[in-house]
Amino acid sequence: MIKTRIVSVDAINPREEYLKEAADVLREGGLVVIPTETVYGVCANLLHKKAVARLSEIKARPKDKPFSQHIDRKEKIEALARDIPIQAYKLMDAFWPGPLTLVFKARDNGTVGLRLPDNEIAQKVIAFADVPVVCPSANLNGKPAPTCFREALQDLEGLVEYAIDAGPTKLGLESTVVDVSSDTVAVLREGAIKKEEIERVVRTKTVLFICTGNSCRSVMAQALLQKKLKEAGRTDVEVLSAGIMMLSGLGASEPTKEVLREEGIDVSAHRSQRVTKELALKSDIILVMEKLHEERLLQLVPGIKNRVFLLKEFAKIKDNNLNIDDPIGTTLEFYRQTCAVIKESVERVSNII
């Protein structure tokens, strides 16, 4: 039997020295019980063969059935998974960090299950350990997953080196497991997130409009498409906008507010955001105002080339200039002309999504 070191921490403000101790134990091949938002888990360093073998023995896990990995940052998925579909990015955006395990095509062969837990203690232990971490529920085979520390230690005390008590878990249900490794997204296990929620997110199309500052053109496009979809009774499309160069949190320009008021639309609540890699990757179609925006976006995320279009390509009357020029600093009449071109293009976009 092993002497299990047990520490108690505050779930909201945990003592980092204990989390670093746990990470050291994990890195060196020990087994560690940690809380997550779903249930308590028992962790092992995936690179330490003896640790994984011990964990498999405790969990009565067949050798050909790998454990899912827990990560502390979304960015780690690209080093572990390949051919990641849009639907996976939608699910990550909606539910990570949280009670969702996604099964991807692995970088080497086969598949890999990944989860980003919504728990500061779990995230910090993984980050401090700086090794691949597997973390199944802290129960013996055939017993229910533990939702409090006492349940976790009933069977595992003396079998693990370190255990962190942070009180009852927030959700008390295991994660939902979804396979995104093939053309069809499949719910393998329904847990804290219901199957209907998964299906709703997967079905939702995301349209992203891009301009320079996210205060004029992309705001017009987003507002006009949202109005068009509402009139059509569509609830299956998410419409977003962002800028390639700006400070987040700014409102729409005053002329933009004025021309949209003339369309019966109030954008006084709009706040600008800068386009991110995650935002682009979850979008089904990305519509930019200028060629420059397309170039900058593809520098940020090269793999989305087939999803990026100039918005003016959808206008009925085309000319040699497919850019929709920036109205900043021009007259209110130029804003109206810009809005008219965007409105015409958006109407055609609404018919094809």
Image: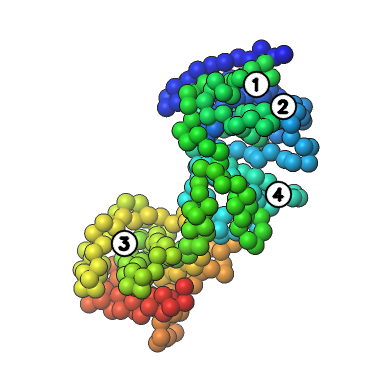
In the picture provided, is 178 more to the left or to the right than 169? Answer: right
Q: Residue at horizontal 35%, vertical 60%?
A: 213
The N terminus, quarter of image: top right
Q: Which mark is residue 156?
A: 1
- Percent across and percent down for residue 241 are 39, 62
Viewer-nearest of labels 4 and 2?
A: 2
Is the residue under label 2 in contact with that under label 1 (CB below 8 Å)? yes
Q: Quadrant of residue 243?
A: bottom left
| Residue 199 showing in the rendered view | yes
Mark toward the start of the polypeptide (4 vs 2): 2
Mark toward the start of the polypeptide (1 vs 3): 1
Q: Residue at horizontal 47%, vertical 77%?
A: 352
Viewer-nearest of labels 1 and 4?
A: 1
Per the image, label 4 sits on a secondary structure element best described as strand
In the picture provided, is 26 more to the left or to the right than 281? Answer: right
- Percent across and percent down for residue 342 are 35, 75
Question: What kind of residue is marked 1?
Answer: Leu
**Label 1 vs label 2: CA separation?**
8 Å
Viewer-nearest of labels 3 and 2?
A: 2
Viewer-nearest of labels 1 and 3?
A: 1
**Label 1 vs label 3: CA separation?**
56 Å
Q: Residue at horizontal 64%, vertical 21%?
A: 155
Q: Which residue is mark 4?
A: 111
Q: Which residue is mark 2?
A: 58
Per the image, label 1 sits on a secondary structure element best described as helix
